[in-house]
Amino acid sequence: MFNMKSAAVAAAALVASACVAGAEKIEVTHWWTSGGEAAAVGVFADAVNAAGHEWVDGAIAGGGNARPVILSRIAGGDPMGATQLNTGRDAEDLVQAGLMTDLTDLAEAEGWADFIRPSKLLDSCTYEGRIYCVPVNIHSFQWMWLNRGAYATAGVDVPSNWDEFVAAAPALRDAGITPLAVGGESWQISGMSGVFQVALGGLDLYRAINVDKSPEAAASAEMTQVFEAIAAARGMVDDGYVGRVWNDATAMVINGKAGAQIMGDWAQGEFGVAGQTAGDEYDCLPGLGVYPVLDTGGDAFYFPKPNKNVEAMTAAQLEMASLLVSKQVQVDFNLAKGSLPIRGDIDLAAANACMQKGLAILANPENVLPSSEQAFTGDTQGQFEDLWVSFFNDPSISVEDAQARYVEIVANAD
């Protein structure tokens, strides 16, 4: 049986070593640069600084830009003190190469397995029975965000599902409002496509492709409907979407220039910074109002093995890891970020209506799906992204041709 008293003593001993070692400057790399993200990362920075260390911010705008820089620095012998990556297989090669600090003793002492949920989050940080990262939130792409005022201006009801959204689109167009705000970065279009897959294709289709990697499911009529819906969505965007960053697309919804955006729950942080309230100025539809599910992606922190001042920096890394999963830090960070906490034992009474929807979905394990970062290697994810971007940007690519390429990728996925 897990002994909480002895665990607490052991955990205290582990993090106390950091205090003995003294204050450390911890360079932290991440790609949280939007308004809502900056507010959230400030929670972590404040906690680290309050513990006597110094958070040295190493923000790099855009995950697509940041990830290769982060991974190459670690592999090249220039490690930062800590880095954000997605929960999943981003750092798999570096872990296998022995370049990440082992957090297992701390995790066992503090009982992470007892409060981190769903368990697959910690599983994604585990290699050969050892833990090498700490999940800090649960993010899901499975959301649509809608401006209530835009629909009032257009004289139609706020949609409660995808079909109603499609039906309302002409009224928004007539009112000079873009129906669907989209950012043209590859990860945005790929993520949006994944939302269509489960919202229109259903849970069985999503699991067959993302868990079983079934070429038959990829070639199914249900998946054809997904491609057809994405083709239809191409006609609901404005001409300026190419290259637009995600938070600028969110701003279009916040300002009433667009009716809706399909984007992960991190978009909610932008609504918060703008002073808007769920249920008043904006609404949210998990699973496009069709299948209210969540894919449990998110963010995790890794701690590359230091190559100088090793003992003191390792101790500081352990203390930071402990802080990131502590109860109050989890509450404050996730309320600012718009994400769901990785702890199931904290009070989120202050959570808004959309976060409460997410918590209710998360309470049912049947509604929890693996994210693409957890299901596929970086190479396979890149092939999917290339396909979705080409298909969305080029109307001359037929549904049949795009789906044939999709089947090929799934058949060879790893």
Image (spheres, helix red, strand yellow):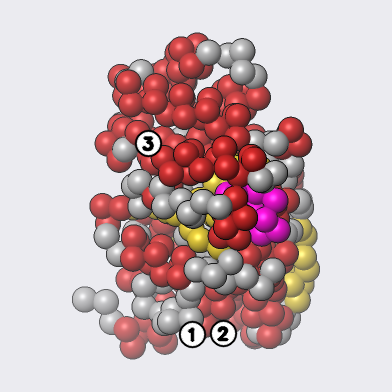
Crowd tier of the residue under label 3, counting other residues whose Cα lies within 10 Å: few below 14, some 14–19, many 20 or above: many
Instruction: Give the label on residue 16, or none.
Output: 2
- 360 relative position to 130: left or right: left
- 332 relative position to 117: left or right: right
The x and y percentages for residue 331 are: 51, 77
The residue that label 1 is drawn on is 12
Helix, strand or loop at label 1? It is: helix
Helix, strand or loop at label 3? It is: helix
Q: Is residue 257 magenta?
A: yes
Residue kind at label 3, given as amino acid type = Leu
The residue that label 3 is drawn on is 200
The residue lying at 55 percent from left, 32 percent from top is 233
Residue kind at label 1, given as amino acid type = Ala
Residue kind at label 2, given as amino acid type = Ala
For this rendering, which residue is in front, 386 or 153? 153
State which region is magenta. 253-260
The x and y percentages for residue 127 are: 43, 49
For residue 237, say whether it is visible. Answer: yes
The x and y percentages for residue 379 are: 56, 29
The x and y percentages for residue 345 are: 36, 78
The correct choice, above or below, for 400 with respect to 255 in the image is above
